[in-house]
Amino acid sequence: MSTPATQRSTGTTASPIRVRDAIRALPAYVPGARPGRDDVAKLSRNALPFPAQAAVVEAVARAAAEINRYPQMAGDSLVAALAARYADKGVSPEQVVVGTGSVALIQHVLDTVCDEGDEVVLPWRSFEAYPICVAVAGATAVKVPVTADGRHDVPAMLAAITPRTRVVMACSPNNPTGPALTAAELRQLADGVPEDVLLLVDEAYLDFVTDPAVGDALDLLAEHPNLVVSRTFSKAHALAGMRVGYLIAEPGIIAAIRSVATPFGVALPAQAAAVAALEPEVLAETARRAGVVAAARARVIGVLRERGWTVPDAQGNFYWLAVGEETAALNEHLTAAGVLARPFVGDGVRVSVGTREDDDRLLAALETWTGSRA
Ligand SMILES: *Cc1c(COP(=O)(O)O)cnc(C)c1O
């Protein structure tokens, strides 16, 4: 691969300490670009184009008065609030673990079940943090290509399972390609994964889904004690800066993951923010905003398709322009027009849904693009 993501991050050091080979070979995580100037449309990190809600900010301010104290060790109040939120899905507090963002929790899952040389089956292209987490756990990523329209290839993923497979990962909606697993696909995956292999379904963008055929992995928990569902406060809840995510699974797996997770991991203001984000009025506004984002997504993609672009189904707050070899050129074109997107060299450009103004800037920039329309 020739992406910047393969640059070695830790390979050269003046220190005599021997860094594990798996760590020396890690690709650097390349976050979406930060703006170098003010007048740019920042569509590179899939963050919500709205600030956190006032009630959440007030909860953080109140929590600031207590930060000389440790937070609750395992975030019991937040865990209880999450269990209450999903009570209709039969979720109890011992089925929930919270952590410093879902990426940290995904790492904990892999550290909990993988030994050196074990295999983790994952869709590709998908979230770039996955192969890094797998490598840190000492395991081997088995990447199963997504289909031409950016969907998980469920039969191919099931066929990739070997006796060394310990985890199968899914991302629904898939970052960066956009489609989500239907309820039927989720069921096919869950039914096909052997019961002693952990199935991790990352639903970071589920709040933005509008297609009624898309599944909710929580509905499969009762039948599948090997299933772990990952969600986050970073996207629809507009709390990316607070770093809070959570997992829901069978109590035995959750207990094992808790023993791996950093004690007192979620900071006191972050716990307060997440609890406040689960208040009914705040949740209602979060759902309304997710609807606004989904409508903006439909508008932009509608315009692009009218112009002849092929855009895969987009169920998150982003869409995928699979221009392949022209990715770097398209990204430069967008940057010159004041639009920061997220290029994956050789594959395509992911664009987040932004404000109306941001989206219009993106549409104007693409109007003068003369290259491939994916
Ligand atoms: C943004 C994102 C997350 C969220 O990560 P946090 O660590 O909770 O901020 C998880 N999974 C995917 C696929 C994402 O794109």
Image (cartoon, rainbow, N blue to C red):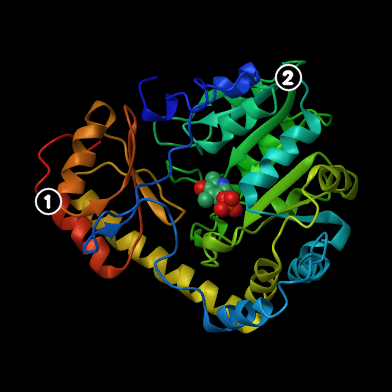
For badge 1, the amino acid type reads Glu
Between residues 67 and 38, which one lies in front from this camera angle? Answer: 67
**Quadrant showing the N terminus:** top left
- Identify the residue at image location x=43%, y=54%: 46
Quadrant position of residue 100: bottom right
Q: Secondary structure at mark 2?
A: loop
Residue 68 visible in the displayed image:
yes
For residue 367, the mark is: 1
Q: Is residue 263 above or below residue 236?
A: above
For badge 2, the amino acid type reads Asp
How far apart marks 1 and 2 lie (CA) works out to 47 Å
Q: Earlier in the sequence, mark 1 or mark 2?
A: 2
**Quadrant showing the C terminus:** top left
Between residues 238 and 307, which one lies in front from this camera angle? Answer: 238
Q: Residues within 10 Å of mark 2 (few under 14, many from 20)?
A: some
* Residue 334 x/y as whole percent: 20, 47
According to the picture, the residue beneath numbered tag 2 turns out to be 118
For residue 199, the mark is: none
